[in-house]
Amino acid sequence: MKKSLNYLPPDKRRDLRQLVSIIREEVRGCVMVILYGSYARGTFVDYDQRIEYGVPTYFMSDYDILIVTERRIGTGSESSLYAKILRRFYENKNWKFHTRPQLINASIGELNRELEKGRYFYTDIKKEGVMLWDSGGYTLARRRKLNYAEIAQMAGEYFEEKFSFANDLLIDAKFDYSREKYKLCSFHLHQAAENFLRTIPMVFILYGYKDHDLEALLNYAKTYTLEVCDVFPRDTEEERRLFSLLQAAYVQARYNRNFAVSREDIDALLPRIERLREVTEKVCRERIRFYREKACAKG
């Protein structure tokens, strides 16, 4: 884990030093403060204002902060504690246009258990994060080699969570279709496809890619099953147009008032997303069954 913030502009370093100071004063039993996400990776957006399809928008990356404590902060006091930290941080700042901290908490025991298991969210934090403050009283665990029973359990949990979420998005798309809301339907179809595709590597390698780009997600997924390639054939001009429309829907269905999606477009796309659901469920259940059989053979 990195320790230096020298790659960040001076104002960002000042913000993060102030945040650490406030957190240490306000959070009892704090043992580490870790920066993760885009500011840790150096891929942050400080302030981006533009007109998108006639609509003024702006975007700023957040300071993603993991507060590690000896014991987990109580659920009842967590939100009020975070609000107090943010109030102090925003004093004498224009909060509407200042980088916003996003705070989460884990106990050191919980964090180390998840690191040992190789939970991708926490292993990413350890790999890409910056240690802003360390009490020196604890060390972060290393990922250990999982047995097949543990892999089967984790893969099953990832599958149930992500596949169910993708299926709910597909249900939303069908509801949009029934109301003839074809543009909104295209957005939900994109989100369903994205999450079905993300489910496959989560089951096979216990890692979830964060892309919204369907082309990239297809490339990740086809490492584990070539059946996903058949879902979106692009041999003809019409097939390429439909895939491009689905790709574009993630942004344009929300922001471009002139983005046109017809009933015929949805009639062509919907069966493909349903087919993607079938492929995802089949290959993931087969893989989880493989893990369980291996676990039984070892047991």
Image: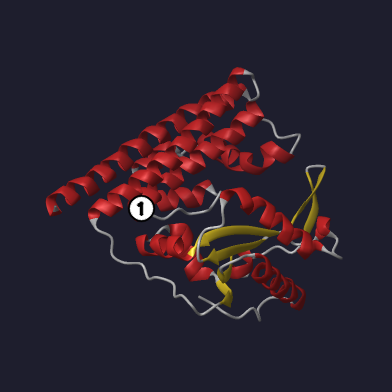
Secondary-structure class at tag 1: loop
| 10 Å crowding of disc 1: few (<14), some (14-19), many (20+) | few
**Is residue 8 in view?**
yes
Q: 219 or 15, which lies in front?
A: 15
Residue at the image point whose x is 45% and y is 38% from the top = 232
Q: 116 or 12, which lies in front?
A: 116
Which residue has dot 1 on it? 223
Vertical arrangement, residue 60 with respect to residue 246, above or below: below
Q: Is residue 293 left or right of residue 98?
A: left
Q: At label 1, which amino acid type do we have?
A: Thr
**Is residue 37 in view?**
no
Instruction: Identify the image quadrant of residue 123.
Output: bottom left
Residue at the image point whose x is 60% and y is 48% from the top = 76
Q: 196 or 134, which lies in front?
A: 134
Vertical arrangement, residue 214 with respect to residue 13, above or below: above
Q: Is residue 58 left or right of residue 73?
A: right
Residue at the image point whose x is 53% and y is 65% from the top = 69
Q: Is residue 236 left or right of residue 285?
A: right
How far from the left and from the top, in percent, is residue 184? 64, 30
How far from the left and from the top, in percent, is residue 174? 54, 24
Vertical arrangement, residue 159 with respect to residue 14, above or below: above
How far from the left and from the top, in percent, is residue 122? 47, 61
Residue at the image point whose x is 34% and y is 44% from the top = 156
Total tally of numbered discs in the picture? 1
How far from the left and from the top, in percent, is residue 26? 67, 65
